[in-house]
Image (spheres, rainbow, N blue to C red):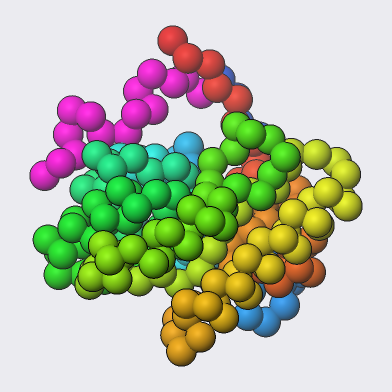
Amino acid sequence: MYICADIIQLRNIKVVGYIDMDIRENLKKILNTLPEGVQLVAVSKTKPVESIREAYAAGQRIFGENRPQEMAAKHQELPSDILWHMIGQLQEKNVKYIAGFVDLIHSVDSLKVLSRIDREAAKHDRVIDCLLEFHIAREETKAGLRLQEAEEILKSEVCRNMRNVRIVGVMGVATNTDDEDIIREEFHHLKEIFDDLKRKYFSKEASFKELSMGMSGDYQIAVGEGSTLVRVGSSIFGEREYRTK
């Protein structure tokens, strides 16, 4: 087992506040706003297992985490039919924690990471679905590929020879702003990237269909621009306040 001493890196974080919310009711409200064909990823990062159980009891099956060790620990405690999505930046060394069970990795931003996913998936005799993450925000601190970088990956012999990963779409995070025009423009740009890659590299691949964009504050804009996966956390589970030791 990989999990033990280094399990869940929350050990250096102390929860000092939690807003109690009706998770079941929140899920219902959000799902009622989503059209057919758009899936909800309930972002459960840093949330306790009990909250995830409540969402599960309400019918939610897709949960998103951003720390591999935390996801692995929760996977062990929760029902086996949960579909776990890795939505945070993924380092090569941490792929091993989730390769045996993760359903979708949203955040592939380099050939090195994709190669490690392929190798780790092979150890479990699995094919792991992945999204290419693109930098679409005006904030340089946001992660993600440029279109030219993504095309270099897709054209590479290394990528073409992979047998244990499947690229099924793209992901992006919009600028943190109240200006809806900027957000809409960035989501529209990501949809154009998706369409371009679909036409050039995946025209015969029905599996290349996912466009992951939109969070609690902007998911409705994202849906309007073609999102198929929205990543919503605080609007379901509420906010938590942390301080480090």
The C terminus appears in which quarter of the rendering? top left
- The image quarter containing residue 19 is top right
Relative placement, left or right, of 220 versus 199 is right
The x and y percentages for residue 206 are 47, 87
Please determine whether, in this image, residue 110 is positioned above or below residue 204: above
Residue at screen point 32% across, 49% down: 113
The x and y percentages for residue 109 are 44, 49
| Residue 25 visible in the current orientation | no
Relative placement, left or right, of 232 versus 116 is right
Relative placement, left or right, of 244 versus 230 is left
Please determine whether, in this image, residue 38 is positioned above or below residue 4: below
The x and y percentages for residue 157 are 28, 66
Relative placement, left or right, of 163 versus 155 is left
Residue at screen point 83% across, 49% down: 182
Please determine whether, in this image, residue 63 is positioned above or below residue 1: below
Give yes or no for residue 8 being in the magenta stretch.
yes
Between residues 223 and 216, which one lies in front from this camera angle? 223
Between residues 189 and 77, which one lies in front from this camera angle? 189
Between residues 8 and 58, which one lies in front from this camera angle? 8
The x and y percentages for residue 205 are 44, 85
Residue at screen point 38% across, 44% down: 90
| Residue 7 visible in the current orientation | yes
Residue segment shown in magenta: 1-15
Residue at screen point 76% across, 68% down: 225
Please determine whether, in this image, residue 87 is positioned above or below residue 245: below
The N terminus appears in which quarter of the rendering? top left
Q: Give the total number of marks visible in the rendering.
A: 0
